[in-house]
Amino acid sequence: MSNLFARFRETLRDMSETELAVEIAQPRKLLIETDNARGKRLEIVYAPFDHVNLAADLVIVGLTPGRQQMRNALIESHRRLAMGEHVSEILKATKTFASFSGPMRTNLVAMLDSIAVNRILGIQSCISLWADHSHRIHFTSALRYPVFVDGENFSGTPNILETTILKKALSKWFAAEMYALPNAIFLPLGPHATTAVYATSEAIGMKSTKILSGLPHPSGANGERIAFFLGRKRQGELSNKVNPAGLIAARAALESKISALGGWS
């Protein structure tokens, strides 16, 4: 499966900490590809998110790594390169280090357990996917490597499927991952990642029965939706920013899919 670590390894290894900080703020040496779309500059930047866990039963799919994730991954891999660690260990450790942490992980685990993903996997709680059962989860993004639009984190605009550079990236890296994990459950986070995952499954001829879409994004900024999804907040307590009907429908659809996957229906 294609990865870019070999291409950028020496560049990353030989940077000083100061040079790396400058590169993270304004990438030049780690640029993979650039293009312009609708008057905006698009940049795809290398960060060591190459590792794919081919033993995974559950694949969590974000949209693309943001600058903070990129920073964490580059700093950790730079440190491990200086220690002379083996490439496979660097890529595996870096991916785990830069994946969900803190409140975002807490929110994600609570939602996964609430819809019985833990039961599908035969574990007590999905929190063990970050510990004893880490070999059963794979973290990835529809756009594997960080994408920036005019220097800012990509948030879904322009449309991946309508933008040549982004559609090419989706097909080159994520489609290969999805094809290599035909028996895994895919759980996309957010509407743009969801659209990309369904489009990819159709493109490679994979059935969508194992795509669990509709989970609120676990970001702390999404706290009200998460609280309602988990039954911790009643409908009458919600602000007008929340669409309760949509969340109720999404949860029902997820529970139905989980039930079918578990053979409980």
Image (cartoon, rainbow, N blue to C red):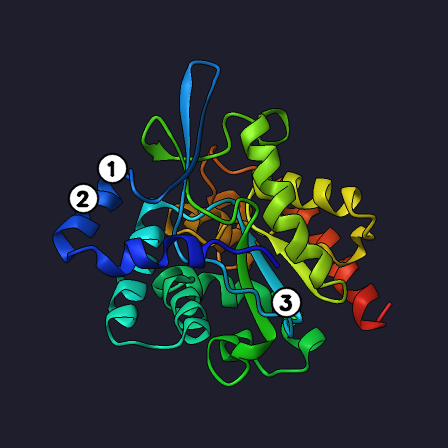
Residue 132 against residue 94 in the figure, above or below: below
Residue 37 against residue 247 in the figure, above or below: above
Q: Nearer the viewer, residue 57 or 173?
A: 173
State which tag comes first along the sequence, 3 or 1: 1
Query: Residue pushed farthest bottom?
Result: 132
Q: Nearer the viewer, residue 198 or 44?
A: 44
What residue is rendered at 65% in x and 42% in y? 171
Q: Secondary structure at mark 2?
A: helix
Is 213 placed left or right of 264 in the picture? left
Instruction: Indicate the amino acid at tag 1.
Output: Gln
Cβ atoms at labels 1 and 2 below 8 Å apart: yes
The residue indicated by pointer 1 is 26
Instruction: Indicate the amino acid at tag 2.
Output: Val
Residue 265 placement (x, y as % from top left)? 87, 67
Mark 3–mark 1 Cα distance, whole angstroms, equals 34 Å
Q: Secondary structure at mark 1?
A: loop
The residue indicated by pointer 3 is 58
Is 74 placed left or right of 22 in the picture? right
Cβ atoms at labels 3 and 1 below 8 Å apart: no
The residue indicated by pointer 2 is 22
Mark 3–mark 2 Cα distance, whole angstroms, equals 35 Å
The mark lying in front, picked from 3 and 1, is 1
What residue is rendered at 31% in x and 31% in y? 151
Instruction: Indicate the amino acid at tag 3.
Output: Leu
